[in-house]
């Protein structure tokens, strides 16, 4: 299956996401914030990035913008999984290059459904 980078500053949220994704056969690499994720993205290929928005050091929108600057991430699906649900934030996500937006708390079946739709 896919290699997914799961980015969240909450250890419990990372574990829940990782449990859901590995249970569906995906391989998961966890990152504790956007900066950690960006560093990992420079040394490993990912089929999908699943990121929170509100994090220290580098937030989800900042991470998305930085990843989209690199050719290997031009078409990689980047999903925002966050408590942010305003239309303004979703527009900012689209402008940054996010593929989709999911609101926490997440439904595991819905998360997997969306991931399966966006992974090529």
Image (cartoon, rainbow, N blue to C red):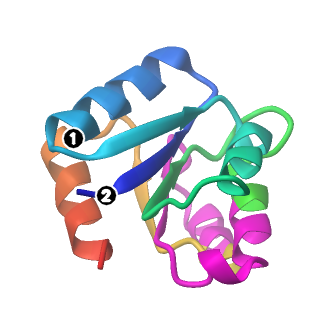
Give how far across and how far down residue 83 sits, in percent: 51, 40
Does residue 41 belong to the magenta stretch?
Answer: no
SS of the residue under disc 2: loop
Residue 71 is drawn in which quadrant?
Answer: bottom right
Determine which of the numbered discs, if any, sits on residue 107 in the image.
1
Please state the extent of the stretch shown in magenta in the rendering: 64-93
Compared with 57, 95 (above or below) is below
Report the residue at 66% width, 54% height from top. 41
Compared with 17, 49 (above or below) is below
* Mark 1 nearby-residue class (10 Å; few <14, some 14–19, many ≥20): few
Q: Which numbered disc, 2 or 1, marks the residue that appears first in the sequence?
A: 2
Residue 16 is drawn in which quadrant?
Answer: top left
Give how far across and how far down residue 57 sits, in percent: 86, 36
Q: Is residue 116 left or right of residue 96?
A: left
Residue position marked by numbered label 2 in the rendering? 2
Q: Residue pushed farthest front? A: 43
Does residue 78 belong to the magenta stretch?
Answer: yes
Q: Is residue 47 left or right of residue 10?
A: left
Q: State the quadrant of the C terminus.
A: bottom left
SS of the residue under disc 1: loop
Q: Is residue 37 left or right of residue 51?
A: right
* Mark 2 nearby-residue class (10 Å; few <14, some 14–19, many ≥20): some
Compared with 65, 27 (above or below) is above
Residue nearest the viewer, comparing 98 with 45: 45
Q: Nearer the viewer, mark 2 or mark 1?
A: 2
């Amino acid at each position: 299956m896919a290699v997914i980078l799961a980015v969240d500053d909450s250890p419990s949220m990372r574990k829940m996401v990782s449990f859901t994704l590995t249970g569906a056969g995906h391989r998961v690499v966890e990152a504790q914030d956007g900066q950690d994720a960006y560093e990992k993205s420079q040394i490993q290929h990912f089929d999908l990035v699943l990121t929170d928005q509100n994090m220290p050091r580098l937030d989800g929108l900042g991470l998305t913008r930085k990843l989209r600057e690199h050719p290997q991430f031009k078409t990689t699906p980047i999903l925002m999984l966050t408590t942010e649900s305003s239309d303004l934030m979703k527009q900012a996500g689209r402008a940054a290059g996010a593929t989709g937006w999911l609101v926490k708390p997440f439904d595991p079946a819905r998360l997997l459904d969306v991931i399966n739709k966006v992974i090529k």
